[in-house]
Image (spheres, coloured by chain):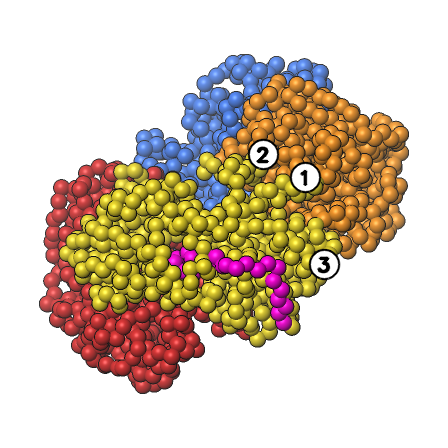
Chain colours: A blue, B orange, C yellow, D red
Amino acid sequence: MSKELMWDGLKEECGVAGVIQMEDDHTAELLYFGLYALQHRGQESAGIAVNDGDKTRWHKDMGLVSEVFDNEELEKLTGHIGIGHVRYSTSGESDVENAQPLVVRYRGGTIALAHNGNLVNARLLRDRLEDAGVVFQTTIDSEVIVNLIARYSNEGIHQAIRRSMELIKGAYALVIMNEECLIGVRDPLGLRPLCIGKTEKGYVLASESSAFDVMGAELVRDVEPGEMVTITPEGIQSEFFQSLPRRAGCIFEYIYFARPDSIIDGINVYEARKNSGRVLAKECPVEADMVMAVPDSSIPVALGYAEASGIPYGEGLIKNRYIGRTFIQPTQAIRELAVKLKLSPMAANIKGKKLILIDDSIVRGTTSKRIVETLKQAGAKEVHVRVSSPPVAYSCYFGIDTPDRNQLIGAVKTVDEIRKIIHADSLHYLTPEGLVEALGKPEKNFCLACFDGNYPMELPEKAQQQNGQRVFQRLDKENQ
Amino acid sequence: MSKELMWDGLKEECGVAGVIQMEDDHTAELLYFGLYALQHRGQESAGIAVNDGDKTRWHKDMGLVSEVFDNEELEKLTGHIGIGHVRYSTSGESDVENAQPLVVRYRGGTIALAHNGNLVNARLLRDRLEDAGVVFQTTIDSEVIVNLIARYSNEGIHQAIRRSMELIKGAYALVIMNEECLIGVRDPLGLRPLCIGKTEKGYVLASESSAFDVMGAELVRDVEPGEMVTITPEGIQSEFFQSLPRRAGCIFEYIYFARPDSIIDGINVYEARKNSGRVLAKECPVEADMVMAVPDSSIPVALGYAEASGIPYGEGLIKNRYIGRTFIQPTQAIRELAVKLKLSPMAANIKGKKLILIDDSIVRGTTSKRIVETLKQAGAKEVHVRVSSPPVAYSCYFGIDTPDRNQLIGAVKTVDEIRKIIHADSLHYLTPEGLVEALGKPEKNFCLACFDGNYPMELPEKAQQQNGQRVFQRLDKENQ
Amino acid sequence: MSKELMWDGLKEECGVAGVIQMEDDHTAELLYFGLYALQHRGQESAGIAVNDGDKTRWHKDMGLVSEVFDNEELEKLTGHIGIGHVRYSTSGESDVENAQPLVVRYRGGTIALAHNGNLVNARLLRDRLEDAGVVFQTTIDSEVIVNLIARYSNEGIHQAIRRSMELIKGAYALVIMNEECLIGVRDPLGLRPLCIGKTEKGYVLASESSAFDVMGAELVRDVEPGEMVTITPEGIQSEFFQSLPRRAGCIFEYIYFARPDSIIDGINVYEARKNSGRVLAKECPVEADMVMAVPDSSIPVALGYAEASGIPYGEGLIKNRYIGRTFIQPTQAIRELAVKLKLSPMAANIKGKKLILIDDSIVRGTTSKRIVETLKQAGAKEVHVRVSSPPVAYSCYFGIDTPDRNQLIGAVKTVDEIRKIIHADSLHYLTPEGLVEALGKPEKNFCLACFDGNYPMELPEKAQQQNGQRVFQRLDKENQ
Amino acid sequence: MSKELMWDGLKEECGVAGVIQMEDDHTAELLYFGLYALQHRGQESAGIAVNDGDKTRWHKDMGLVSEVFDNEELEKLTGHIGIGHVRYSTSGESDVENAQPLVVRYRGGTIALAHNGNLVNARLLRDRLEDAGVVFQTTIDSEVIVNLIARYSNEGIHQAIRRSMELIKGAYALVIMNEECLIGVRDPLGLRPLCIGKTEKGYVLASESSAFDVMGAELVRDVEPGEMVTITPEGIQSEFFQSLPRRAGCIFEYIYFARPDSIIDGINVYEARKNSGRVLAKECPVEADMVMAVPDSSIPVALGYAEASGIPYGEGLIKNRYIGRTFIQPTQAIRELAVKLKLSPMAANIKGKKLILIDDSIVRGTTSKRIVETLKQAGAKEVHVRVSSPPVAYSCYFGIDTPDRNQLIGAVKTVDEIRKIIHADSLHYLTPEGLVEALGKPEKNFCLACFDGNYPMELPEKAQQQNGQRVFQRLDKENQ
C-alpha cells in the first residue's frame, strides 16, 4: 500500500506456534490454522516446518499465511512435530531469506526455530561467533541463537539451549523442535507471550491463546518467564534457566497487539480493555452525546467508557474491510480524498454531536489528527479524545517496531500541544496507574518502558543498533 | 476460499459509478476511489472506462479494484468523462468477458455502460434481437441494452435510451457515457439505488452516497425511479421516461447490503438499522445479560436493541480481518476447527451469560447454527436470536443472488423449526411492519418480495431462466 | 523484449486450426498440439473453442499456447468439433478482447470463427453494419464477418457464409464451426494458406501441413481459392463461391513464414528455399571461402547455394536459444553489447574468410547492417550478402505486418546504396524471375505485390486505414 | 515440461561469471549479459551479487536469467565488483535456498561465491565442520567452501582460500569476491572450465569465452588447473595452490555442453566438433544420400562428416523453437503425437533416402530410438547413426548430471544391441582415440571417465552420496 494510506501505529513483530502429536494427525494444517489466527501479529512472511522424526521439511515465503500455503504445499509437510511463524520484521531486513522458521542441520541432526522478540546483544554475539569462524547468511537474531545451540550441542540439546539462553539477552519467545521434541522458551522477564495448549492427541504452543480454538486445543497455562518446556507427545517437562524477582510483560499486548479473545499471563485481554475504558471515564470525565472508538481494537475500551460514564456508545467511523496491501500512489492533488478510504465518518451519526473518541494510543499523531478533522468535517460539534494508554515517549527494543524517539509525538510535545496539533477539544491519556489498575495486577509485572523509559534491562549500544546491520543485506531496501 | 468457509448470505451483485468534469482532473483516479468505497457491492471483477470526448479507453479484469488497477493502468485512462463498475455476478457466467463497463462502437460513436440490477425480459429481448441478426458475445444483460440503444440511435442518444428503457423490464441502475455526456438511469420502481453528487469541477454518480466522500463530492439527490439524468459539466437535465404510482426500493439495501454511512432515497442506513434494533427490542423482549451482534452489519442493530432494552451491548464474536479469498480446503476430520477461523467467540465475555444475538438475516440457516453452537461451546447459558428482517422465503429476481427457494430455510421451515435447527433458546424475526416502521417510510416505497412473494412486476418465465443461459458460455463453470 | 533486441523483419499474423471427429477423442488436445506446431505464425495470443453439438466452450488469452493452456483448461473444453487460433495481430489492437476464436450466439445457435488474413473493406462493411444498428466490441475483422453471417443466417449457414464471402474483400483463411460442422474457407485469390488433413476418426484443417504430424493427420489437399469446404465426421462437401482466372498465393510463405516441413499449394517449402539458393548462386556468383546463413530460415537457401556453387557451407552465427520475450532495457552506453546476444559470430570459423551471407529478406536494413558489422569485427575478410527475395518495396495489406513504405529500405534506396549502408562487399537480391523459377510454378500463382506493387485487388482507402481505427480501442497502446 | 517431452541427455550443472572494474560501470548489467550468454549451462536458477567496496547486495531466484532480473532489480545492484551464477543443479535439492551466489558475512567482512562443479568429499567436510559446531542452511557444496574459508580467514583471504582448496576434492571452478577483489579458482585437474577476459575498464571471468563478446571483453587466457587468480581493477595476481602432472578437462564440454563459439583450454569448440565429424567419416564410412544432424549441437559434426565423406549435408529434422518449459501432460492415447512436437521430420527431404544421422551422444537411448523411428515413418530408406562420442558407460561425479549407471544404455548393452533397440541400420560410436584426435591434444589433458571409468580421483563413498543428502531438505521433492 502506498505510504500515504498507512496509518501510523506500533507494529507487533511476530507470532509463533508449535504442535506435537503421537502421530501425524494434520500437523501442518493445525499450524496453518494457528498462524491464520495469529496473522494480526505479522503479515510480511509466513513459514511452517514439520518433522517426522527423521526428515524435516519446510516452506516459507513472503506474504500472508493464505498466500504462502495451499493444499499442495501443506500435504508435503508430513510429520508429527511442527512449528510455524508469522513475521512483521524489525531486526533484519525484510526478505525471504530472513523468513522463519530457520531450519539448520547441525552435528546433532536438524533443528528448527521460530522466534518472537528481539535480542539486545545480538551484534555482540554475532561478532564473537564470527571470530570463531562462523558465517552468517541472514540478518535475523534466530541465526545467532541456532549457532549458539549448535556450538553447545555436544552436551545434549537441553543443556545446549540452557547455555545459549544464559548468553542471549533481550525479549524472546522461542518455539524450537528437533527430531524428538517440541521446546518452548520464554525470556526471564516474560516480555513476549507464549502459552501451552492441550489437544486430544498432544500439545500445542502459541503466542496467544486465541489460536487454540482453531488448533483444537485448550489453554493449559503460560510458559513462565525464564522457563524452558520440553514437550513430547507423552507430556511436558519444565525447567527454569533463570529466575528474576520481577516480570516485564509487554503492556502493549493488552493495549493493542493481542486479539481481545486472548488470555495472557492470566489477564483476559478483552476485559482489560473494557476496564481501561472504565478507568478512563473516571480519570477525566467530560460531557458528551456519544462515545465512539477508532475501530477495531478500541471498541471494548469505548464500551467500558460508555458503561462507566452512562454516555451511549455509537459507531462514528466505518472501516473499509477491503483495504488491501496494494493501493495506487494517489496524485498529490487528491491525496486528501484517498486517506478517507480506510476510515469513513458516519456523518448522520456524528452531526452536531459532542463526541468522545477513544483510541488505544497516539504514536506520531498524524492518524489522530486526520480522524479528528474527518469527524469535524462530518459535523461533529466537539471531539474529546481519550487514549487508553499513557503517551508513548520511548522506543521499544524488545520486539515492537517503534519509530525513532524524535518522531514520537509523546516524546517531543506536551499533552496540550498534542491536543492542539490533533485539533481535539480535549485530550486525556490514561495514566500509568490507571492502566495498571485496569489490568488488575501489580505494576511490577509489566514493562512500561515505552511510557517511562525504565527499560527492564540494559539497552544495546546505540551505534551498533543503527549502523552495524546495514552492511550486509540482500538488496538495498533503503530506496524502496 | 473453500466453500466450507463461505458463510451463507445474500450477495449484492454490482456497484456503479460515474464522473464528468470540465477537463480531465483525475477522472480515472476518482472512479478508482469510488469503486474502492463500493467494493462491498461486488468483489469479482472491476472496470473503468474513460472518454476524452474523442477516444474511449478502458480496462477491466477479474479481481478487487486494488488488484485490477495500478498507477500505470490508471494513467492511460485519460479523459473528462468516465464510468466504473464492480461486479459480483448473478446473470451471466462469471468471466472476464462479462466484466463491465461494456464498451461498444455503434453508428453514433462509442457508448460505455455499467449496470447494477437484473432484467426479467432479457431472454425475450435477446431472442428478438437475434432474430434481427444481432450476435451476442457475452451473457450479460448490458449487451442487450446497448444493442437496443444502438438500434434506436438514429433518433439521437436520448431518444434511443428512452425507447430502450420502455422495452426493458426489471431492476436497473445504469450509468452510461458517450463522447458528450454522462447519463444515469433508474428503473421505474427504483429497485436499485443510484445517487447524484456534486464536486468542485463537475458531477458524479454512484450506487451509494458513501462513495461520495472519497470522490470529493457532496450528495445532491437520488436519481428518481423512472428518471434519466443527462449530465454535462455544465449541469443536469432530467426527464422521466415512466412514472408509477408506487416505488419498490430494495429493502435489503437497508438491512444488509449498503454501507451504514449511505443515505438511500432519503433514508439514513445506519439510523434505519439502529431503529430496527429498537423495534426488535419492543417486538419480542427477553431477559438477558448482554446484547451482541454478528459483526459487522448487525452492530448498529444490536446497539439499537441495547438502547431500547437497557440490556448492555458487548462484543461476543471476533471477526478475523485476514480472511481472504483464498483458503485451503481443510481435511474433513478437522473442518470443524476451520469454521471458527472467521468468527471466534470471545469466551471470557460470554461464559455463563444469557445472550441476545442479533443477525441481519437467516438465509440457509447454516451460519446461524454454527454461531449459536460456537457461543454455547464457549459457555453461553442461553442464546436468544433476534433477526433484523422477516424470514427470507422467496428468491430475488432483481439483482440479488439468492439460493433456490427450496434452500431458503425461511421458505421450508416454521420459525420454531428453525429455532430448533439453529439451537437457539428463542428466535424472533423482525415483522414486516416493524421493519417498515424502522425505515420510517410507508411500505409502498419498498420491495418486500423476498419476504412475502409479492413481486413488484411479472417474473421471467422460469424455464428460460434456468435452462436458456447455459448453452452459451465461455468455459463450463458447472464443475468448479 | 526491449525494442533494441527486436530484429526487424516481416511478421506473419495468424495461424488457424480445426478438428472434427465422430466423438470427443481429445479434440482440444489435438488443437493444442496443432497450435503448438503453428506457434511461429503468431505468439501474441492463443485460443481454442470446442463444441459438443450442444454447448460451445472456449478459452483464449494473451501469450504462447503453452502459457495460455494447461491440462485443467483443456479438460473443460469437451466436444467433437473444435477450432483454434494463434495471433500476431495487425488489424485491431493487441488485447485479449481481440483474441480469437471469436464465439458468438446468433439466431441459429452458436458460431465460432478463426481468421488468418486481413480484409480490405472491413471499415466500409463495419460502417454499413453500424448503420443497421450493429454494435462492435472488438476491432478485429472477424467481428465484421460473424455479423454478416448472422444477418444472412435465416437462409441457412451455408448460404449465409456464401453471401458473406461475396461481400468481404481481402485475404482470408477462415475456420468456422457451429453445432453441426466444421467449415474451411479460403479467399478467391488464395492469399493465405489453408489445408485439409485426414485422421483416423475425422478431419482437420490447418494453416500449414506441418501441423498435421502432431495432429495425427495426413495431408489430403489444400482448400482451393474461393472454395468453402463443409466437413462433418462423415466427409467433406465442397462448393466454390467465387472463381478467378489467377491465384495470388503469398510468396513470403515460401520465403520466410511457413515452416520448412510444410507443403503449401503443392510446393514443398524446404525444397523451394533450397532452390532459391541454387538460383541465387547462378544469378550472381562470387568467389568466397564459405557460404553461411542467418539462422534459421535461410539455412536451406545457403545449403542450396553451397551445392550449386561448390563453395562449402559452414556455420558463422550462433543463435541464442534462450532469447525470450522479456529482456531488460539495456543502458545506452552498453547497448551495442546487448545486440550480440541474439546472434553471436563464430569467430574461429569466420576469421580471415571471404563469406557469402544468405538472408531471406531485408526490410529496414538495420539487422543486416548489424550482422555484417558483427561478422567483420569477428575477422571476416569480405561479406557478400545474397538475399533470397527481391527488395521489399511495398507494404502488404493482406495479412503481413510490414512497416510503412518509407521505412522499407528497398523502397527508398537503390541496391548499391543499401550495400553501402549495410557495409556489405557485394549485395544481390534474388530476381523475381529467379524466385518464381525456384518455386517451380508460373508467376500468375503468386502475389508479388511487396516487390512490385501490383496488388491483386483494389486497396483500402488509405485515410480510413490510418485514422479510422484508433477512435475505438481498449487501452491507448500508442505510448507503450 | 511434462517428462514425456523431455529428451534424455546429459545436463551441465552451472555457469559462473565475474566482473571487476575501476568504478561501477554497469557491473550488474554486464553480469546479466554474461549469464544470458551462459544460460545453456543452467536454466533452473540465476543470481547476481554486486559489491561497492562497502555493501554487498544480491538477488537470486528460480528461473531463467530473463525471468529473475528486470531493470528495477539490476539498478539496485550497484558496485564495481560482481559475480553471477546460473544453475542446473545436481548436488543439493533444487530450491531457491540453494541458488547461488552464496553470500555470507564472516569475521573479515562479506564474501560471495559462485561454484560450477561438484566436490567428492563435501559430506566428509560437512561432518567435520558440524563437529566443530557449524550449522548448515543449504545442501550445496558452496556452503562447505565458505565455511572453510571463514575458518581460516584470520590468516587473510588468500591464505584462507588456499588452505580451503587444499582440503576440498573434486571439480570446481569458483568465482569469489570480497570487498577488495575478484578471485577465480580452478581445481587442480581443470575439470571445469574458467577463463579470463579483459575489458576497457577491468576484467571479467566466465565459464566460457562465448560470454565475453556480450560482456565487452576479450579472451586473455584460461585460469589454469590448480591456479588462483586474484583480480583488482589494476591487474591479475596468480598463484598456484597445487600442481599435478596431468589435466582432466571435461571432454563433454567439447562434445556437447559448451557453446560452439567458445574456446576452452585453447581448443576451438566448433572446430573440434567439425573434426569429430571428419574422423567419424573416416572411422566408419557408409554409402548414403544425405548427412543430417540432430539439431543443434551435432550440426558442425555433420558438416565435418559431409565434408570428409563427400556426401551432401541436408536438414532432416526441424526443431520447434517454441518448446518452452511448460507443456501439458498429454493423454496416454495421443502421447506419440506430442513427442513429435520438439523435432519434426522434414519428410520431403528424407523420403526414399539413405541417411547418415549424426548425434553427439546416446545416454538412455530413448531419444535416439524416437528419432530413428520418426525418420523411417517419414520415408527414410536407411538410417545410419553416427555418434560423435564413445558409449557413455559410467556416471559422472564431477559436475555433470548423469543417470544411474544401470540406466546408461552404453553400460548395459553392446553396440549391436543398441543398434537394434534404436532401429538403426548401422551404428558407430566415435572411438576414444578418434575423439582425442579430433580435439588435437594428447589424451592426458582430458577426463574420459564417462567412457572408460578411469576417474581422475578417488570417488566419494557411494552410500553417503545416495543416502546422506536427503535427510535435510526444504521440501520433499521426491513426490514431484
SS type, badge 2: strand
User: Dot 2, crowdedness within 10 Å: few (<14), some or many (≥20)?
Assistant: many
Mark 2: amino acid: Thr
Q: Position of residue A280 (x, y in %)?
A: 63, 23
- Marks 2 and 3 sit apart, C-alpha to C-alpha, by 37 Å
Q: Where is residue A109 in the image (x, y as percent from the top left)?
A: 38, 60
Residue named by callout 1: C131
Q: Residue at x 18, y 41 (%)?
A: D201
Q: Are marks 2 and 1 in contact (CB under 8 Å)?
A: no
SS type, badge 1: helix
Residue closer to the observer: C283 or B388: C283
Q: Are marks 3 and 1 on the same chain?
A: yes
Chain containing the residue with disc 3:
C
SS type, badge 3: loop
Residue closer to the observer: C209 or B288: C209
Q: Does the magenta stretch include residue C247?
A: yes
Q: Give the residues drawn in magenta, as a range.
A: C235-258
Q: Where is residue B175 in the image (x, y as percent from the top left)?
A: 69, 32
Q: In front of the other: label 2 or label 3? A: 3
Residue named by callout 2: B56
Chain containing the residue with disc 2:
B
User: Dot 1, crowdedness within 10 Å: few (<14), some or many (≥20)?
Assistant: some
Q: In front of the other: label 2 or label 1? A: 1
- Marks 3 and 1 sit apart, C-alpha to C-alpha, by 24 Å
Q: Do the residues labelled 2 and 3 touch (CB within 8 Å)?
A: no
Give the vertical position of B368 relative to B250 (above or below): below
Mark 1: amino acid: Asp
Look at the image and tell me whether residue C4 can be seen. Answer: no
Give the vertical position of B313 relative to D476 (above or below): above
Residue named by callout 3: C156
Q: Which residue is drawn at 33% across and 56% down?
A: C431
